[in-house]
Amino acid sequence: MLEQLTIRNFALIEETQVQFGTGFSAITGETGAGKSVLMGALRVVVGGKTLPAMIRHGADKATVEATFDISDNAEAKKILAAEEIDADDELIIQREILSGGKNRTRVNGVIIKQGTLQNLGETLIQMHGQSDQLLLRDLRIQLKLLDDYCACEPELAAYSETWSTWNKLKEELEKTEENARNLAEQKEFLTFQKNELEKAKLRAGEEAELEEKTSAASKSEAKMHAIEELSKLFDGENGLLSQFEVFQSKIRQFSSKLPEMEEWAVKLGDAYDSLSFIEDALREAEESSELDPAELDRANTRLAQIQRLKRKYRTDEAGLIDLYARRKQELESLENLDADLAEIRKNIQKAEEKLAVAASALSEKRKAGKQTLDAKVAEVLHSLGMPKATFNTDITEEAYSATGKDRVEFCMAPNLGEGQKPLRVAVSGGELSRVLLAFKSVMAEQDHVPVLVFDEVDSGISGEIGNNVGEALRNIGKYHQVLAITHLQQVACRAQSHLAVEKHENGEARTISNVKLLSYNERIVEIARMLGDAKSPTSLAHAKELLEEANAS
């Protein structure tokens, strides 16, 4: 529950601190006193939008701080635990609105994000102003209200699990069908690439081996070319050795006449032996050559093939091998897709059978509960000044969705003789506020949000109907903490506690609003004011009488 609200420099409020009690608290005050400011502060503290205009003129920031007792609020504790915020039974939320447009939010002293505050706020306070009443026109809200009343959570959880399985299978089928179409369209192309790469019989590291082999062969080829060229110098009648032999013969002829040539002949013999050795070495090198021109040609051809494929597919050797594996797998998948599709469709059929059972169980629970819901809502509406109103929850079947197979719509006839029409199109704002109050009365025990705030829920009503509105709010207060802005003394006197919003001018020619928890005697004066004259003995006596009657009822 909300225990305390402290407001500083927020709109007309300079500083005020409000203590809240259990049950139903009425909030009253003259028009323009600042009741809407109090509502605005409550909205801000649970995640509502902040604006620099909310800051009181002359101040650099506004602060709203609320203290909650969350001893029985498991959802709030769960959110705090997820944010690693320490909290036993007390929760303090503080929001600072800065003049630059920014704001700071602290929960038990820890700064948190706006989204976290909004999630936390939903577990603490439920606001019901005119804009909130309009949510009743939303079919999603209507469905949730019915499910909450009928306690459909177990059936909805079972359905949601089955729906999730069924929906995922549908998505898988759609994806597989699309994949099958794409593969079928590309089958010829995929087959061509797969066959071309398969024919190439690529293996990892082959390109490097071929490059090494061709490089070595190129060096060997250059060596053999040199050997062949040198060997030619020894061939034929004009070869080096033949010429040496002629030269030696001439030297021997002349050495008998020229003795000094004997030495030349010896040296020529040595040179001849050296040349002869070189010739033998060249012949041996030619005969022992490992160069295989045919093998080199094959290596160059293979290397050219790999390089052509690399250019064509714009990838390296490893990429070509991977591409072949992928194309092979895609074609194999195409062959298996028919079987896959058949299996998925079979699983969908099984899931849909389970979905139908779960949807029917959920629908039956809704239809069973809607009978009493309709009767109870109509009964409360009768007491709220709509004695001939009829209410009906229309449930029709539609395609499966995340919430079942039911389309739920609230319909109503406010007056006798009128046909029922959907709540979203045929109900006035005043009627809608009473429908909201009727729902809150009927669902007081099921609703888990501890604090309910009503802004002018009694708009457009008076007299005895006001008494009934007050009784309805007091009844809701048995299960929740209820804060309600009201202009009716009949409503205010039925509250367990009474807050008055007052406006006055200070000595600095400034207007200040203040929120005050009234004592019993102060309540008499405030109710007398609401009757028309806070100082009239007659009004004061009437106000006291109203309070006594309300307390006795």
Image (cartoon, helix red, strand yellow):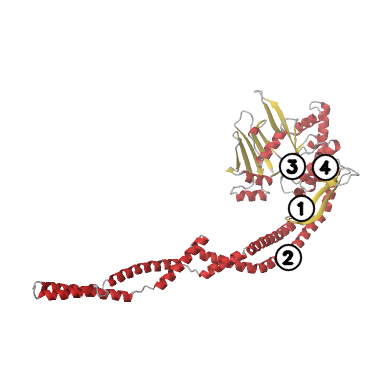
For residue 147, the mark is: 1
Q: Residues within 10 Å of mark 1 (few under 14, many from 20)?
A: many
Label 3 – label 2 distance at C-alpha: 42 Å
In the rendered structure, which disc, 2 or 1, sits on the residue that comes first in sequence?
1
Label 2 – label 1 distance at C-alpha: 27 Å
Whether residue 534 is situated above or below residue 251 in the rendered picture: above
Q: Depth check: 114 or 214 in front?
A: 214
Pinpoint residue 80: horizontal percent, then vertical percent: 62, 48
Label 3 – label 1 distance at C-alpha: 19 Å
Pinpoint residue 42: horizontal percent, then vertical percent: 68, 39
User: What residue is shown with label 3?
Assistant: 132
For residue 471, the mark is: none
User: What residue is shown with label 2?
Assistant: 349
**Tag 3's secondary structure?**
helix
Disc 1 or disc 4, which is closer to the eye?
4
In the drawing, does residue 209 fall left or right of residue 506? left
Pinpoint residue 275: horizontal percent, then vertical percent: 22, 73
